[in-house]
Image: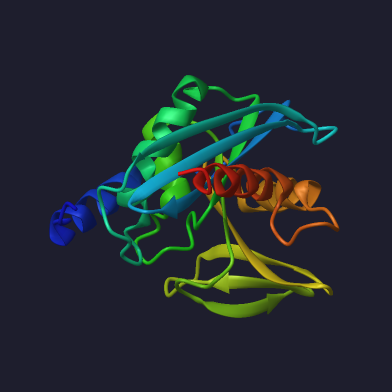
Amino acid sequence: MSILNFKRAKIVQEELAKYVILKDDITYPPELVAGLDISYKGGKAVACCVILDYKTLDIVEVRLVKENIVIPYVPTFLAYRELPYYVYLCYDFKDRNDMVVLVDGHGLAHPRKMGIACHLGVTLNIPTIGVAKKILTGKIVSIKLKRYLQLKDGTLAAVIVERKTYRPLYVSPGHRVSLETAEKIVLKTLTSEYRLPKPIQLAHNFSKMESRRL
């Protein structure tokens, strides 16, 4: 398994963060919404992209890729482990503005403001949103009856979406999507069946199912 040069990787993240667009550069509402997730088993990664119709949340397409794991998991460097699989699955989305990709991981809510959703978005120039289950950085603040994650410089990096039956989710812009729109899109894709947005949950389900066959 490859050893990551953390100093170099950190510099790349800091440089790429300069290219993140936090304004809406999409057709709203989008026509399609996609979800990305990965399962691991026996040294293999099974990455999945599920594309849904935004209005109906019906499945339009399911994509899978199986590859050997090359980079180990290291907090704040998740993109170096998972991005190659996601780029392969989403390459033909490049430069589109009629769809949004939800990534299981952080976007702007990252110590260097370059979570995997940002990294993917900048790499392919596609609208992305990060949806995470745990806080990576920042503190919770309340503003106008809503709760957000706030970073050291005061930037509102992620909104917490709460439902009584599920633990919070941490939603942050990835690329070409504002925080406000990111929240709207995630709320639209939440169902009573799952804690995660439906596109990500389905990607998880398909990738897990495929990994069991390895």
User: Which residue: 50% across, 65% down?
Assistant: 155
User: Which residue: 42% across, 50% down?
Assistant: 116
Quarter where residue 73 is shown: bottom left
The reply, left or right, for residue 70 in relation to residue 163 is left
Colour mapping used in the image: rainbow
Does 72 appear above or below 202? below
Q: Looking at the picture, tell me which residue is in the foreground, 70 or 196.
A: 70
Residue 70 appears anywhere in the view:
yes
Residue 212 pos. (x, y %): 53, 49
The reply, left or right, for residue 122 in relation to residue 133 is left
The reply, left or right, for residue 126 in relation to residue 144 is left
Does 9 appear above or below 53? below
Quarter where residue 142 is shown: bottom right
From this viewpoint, which residue is outermost toward the top? 92
User: Which residue: 36% across, 47% down?
Assistant: 44
Residue 27 pos. (x, y %): 68, 27
Q: Looking at the picture, tell me which residue is in the foreground, 38 or 171.
A: 38
Quadrant into which the C terminus falls: top left
Q: Looking at the picture, tell me which residue is in the foreground, 2 or 52.
A: 2
User: Which residue: 60% across, 49% down?
Assistant: 204
Does 66 appear above or below 138? above
Residue 45 pos. (x, y %): 40, 46
From this viewpoint, which residue is outermost toward the front? 213
Residue 125 appears anywhere in the view:
no
Residue 78 pos. (x, y %): 36, 56
Does 133 appear above or below 69? below
Q: How many marks?
A: 0
